Amino acid sequence: MRPLRSLLAAVVLGTGAFLAVPAAHAQTTPNTVVNPLGTPAQAQPGQPAATPPPAAAPTTGTPFRLNIGLEGNGTNTDVSVAVQIVIIMTLLSVAPSIVLLMTSFTRIVIVLGFLRTALGTTNAPSNQIVVGLSLFLTFFLMGPVFDRVNSDALQPYLNKQITSVEALDRASVPLKQFMLKQTRTRDIEYFLQLGGFGPTAVKDLPMRVVIPAFVVSELQTAFQMGFLLFLPFLVIDFLVSSVLMALGMMMMPPVAISLPLKLLLFVLVDGWHLVVRSLVQSFSA
């Protein structure tokens, strides 16, 4: 009973304190009559007049304004700073994709995706593992190219020896040589024809011709390697389906038998070693 009594006493004391506050406030409030519109009425006879509230002090600060126009704020720049920031952020968001298209990443990630589909494993290995392995193989294969870019363009630019334009020109040279080595001649000729270019020397080929020709060549090579990966697993699927049909086991899904056989074959022939070695040798050829 003691906890219950303590609780009741606390409730009574809290209620009394809550009711005492309005009463004390009513005693200390001056006798000023306020009409319903919120303005003080005339003071009653014998009572002092109510003093008006003090006027609000004028604000001296200027409102914040963000200029996103194209006038450049009176400077010599073509666009305002806000628009320049938006353009830079947009370029930074698409720059990684553009750089990856100029490397061996495209061929590697497509071949690994075809391998997963040929095995019949939907999510094994997962997309994160496929992309991660593709990135590490890309760094391994592109190591000599990145070293040349670092020594010829990045370090001189960081040391204030060359301008940003010169750094971009120097960095494009090793990348261009790598892409031309992996690009088919007919793809380069096709894009030269589409762009309206005449006969051009290899060293004078523009990047807007080399990059799309390289990407198309990489897609072609990746699909050819994917077709070769599908052949042995396609034979296993065909044999399993034929055996099940011969035994009259039509209700049993062929995947339940073909998937373990595919994994067994892939492990016995050391499939990962063969795939990675084929990818690396395809770039060194």
Image (spheres, helix red, strand yellow):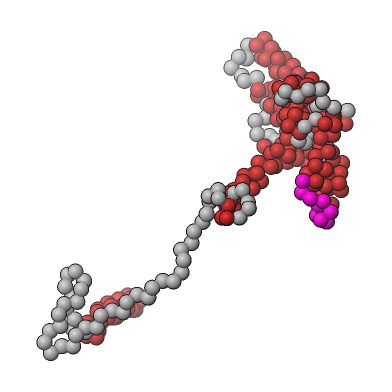
- Left or right of 231, for residue 2: left
Q: Is residue 247 in view?
A: no
Q: Which residue is pictured at 61% across the width and 19% down the height?
A: 252
Residue at the (83%, 38%) spot, across then down = 173
Depth check: give the residue in front, 12 or 40. Answer: 40
Is 214 displayed left or right of 10 in the figure?
right
Outermost residue toward the bottom? 46
At x 17% / y 70%, what residue is drawn?
36
**Which residue is more in the foreground, 94 or 113?**
94
Q: Position of residue 272 (x, y in %)?
A: 80, 32
Examine the structure image and report whether residue 148 is included in the region drawn in magenta.
Answer: no
Does 159 lie within the magenta span? yes
- Can you give x and y, in whole percent of width and height, for residue 158 in the image? 80, 54
Quarter of the view holding residue 180: top right
Quadrant where the image shows the N terminus = bottom left
| Region of the chain picked out in magenta, as a range | 157-165
Give the residue at x 74% y 21%: 193
Nearer to us in this view, 82 or 143:
82
